[in-house]
Amino acid sequence: MKLIIQFLKQPVTIVGIITALLFQVFFSLIWITGYDHVTDRIDQLPIAIVNGDGSAAQSIADNISASLNFEQVKSLSLAEAQDRLGHRSLRMIIELPQGFTASLSEPSSGAKIRYYLNESNPQMVSNVMQGVAAKVTAALDAKSSAAGLGGVLTALKLPEAEAAKIRSSAASRISSDIQIVNPATNFAETMVPLMVVTASFTGGMLLAMNLSKASATLAAAAGKWQRLSARYVLMAGTALTGSLISTSLLNTLGIHSSQGFLGMWMFEFVVILSCMTVANLSLVLLGDAGAWLNIALLSMQMLSSGATIPRDVLSPFYQSVGQFFPAYYAVDGMLDLVIGGEGIMHDVTALLYIAAVATAGSVLLTLLRREKGAIRAEAAANA
């Protein structure tokens, strides 16, 4: 018991206990409020309906639109819709191809309604949209088959029971043609963005915490600008080495990049460096207590990054706040690199901007903060 009391008298023990408790508090508060009623917001996933058959199929397109309880984007050409699908601002395209209505009158061939899905997304998107595609096709097919057989069965004056059997056994007139854009051939590929985000920010916050302690220890040996510069040199070197190790391991384990080894290495370097600069800003701002702020930022970024569920179904607060942190762009970029997408330049630019702003914040705080030694020297001179 005496030993336990001696442990509790050590400040590092208390800090460790508080840190462990805050992990529970922050993750519980942020994740539960973030994921609350997510399934109620599934209708916020955007879908485009493209009518390629003109006025002949307009009534069918209108019926599909009326039956869908989702956010809908209309008046797009197929090329425009495909571009948005590639950028993940659409989650599915429903196309009525040219000649669709004419093919309905040919029972031997039938009509096909075309769906475009982008698998470079959280797994939830693919599951939901494939279910929507199946329901839309089934509803259209049932309506079309009933309309086609109705007149024939009425003319034959068959008993209702026998007519019902004929309706149920009639061949489908409408079928699905699902086109997968950027297919994910390995489930591990879909988990790479979450892995990179978690490892990058967790590693960054631990490095920042230890560099802050080392900086305080070396306060008597070097000035504040020298120590801040040294921290950034060490962060850059660690980010470069860490990104090389991560990229090499991913490549060895069969996860390859559309931009090649060098492209993934440099992107991961920017991701890790951006995470480190944000984590470092917390420590420069709050000292050791900044490590606790970083726990909250880690939880918030994992939630709002779009790695586990699409951002469309998050509450407006988490949709907005995610745009100011590295994880948001790290996930988009890694999805583009590993599964496929429209390129990573936007994400690289955003990550560099975040790193620059965080660095500027650290420099400004260092400029405004006066060290104890300087204050004592000034007081002695004035005396």
Image (cartoon, rainbow, N blue to C red):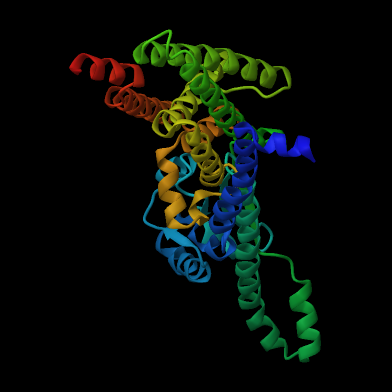
What is the x, y in percent for residue 227?
Answer: 41, 13
Taking 338 as reference, is 86 left or right?
A: left
For the point 76% across and 90% down, the residue is 160
Image mark count: 0
Residue located at (60% from left, 43% from top): 18
Closer-to-camera residue (37/239): 239
Q: Which residue lies furthest to the top in this view?
A: 221
List x then y, in percent, for residue 261.
59, 15
Instruction: Please say if 180 is above or below 219.
Output: below
Identify the residue shown where x is 74% and y is 77%: 167
Against 60, is 178 above or below? Answer: above
Q: Quick one: 177 or 346, which is closer to the camera?
A: 346
Q: For this rendering, which residue is in front, 290 or 155?
A: 290
Query: Against 281, is 293 above or below?
Result: below
Quarter of the image that includes the N terminus: top right
- In the picture, the quarter occupied by the C terminus is top left
Extreme residue toward the front, this view? 383
Residue at 67% from the left image edge and 24% from the top image edge: 255
Q: In this view, does 299 lie to the left or right of 351?
A: right
Q: Visible in this render: residue 168?
A: yes
- Residue with the most extreme left position: 382
Say if residue 79 shows up in the picture. Answer: no
Q: Against 107, is 306 above or below?
A: above
* Image x and y of residue 199, in percent: 61, 29
Q: Where is residue 233 in the image (x, y as percent from the top left)?
A: 45, 11
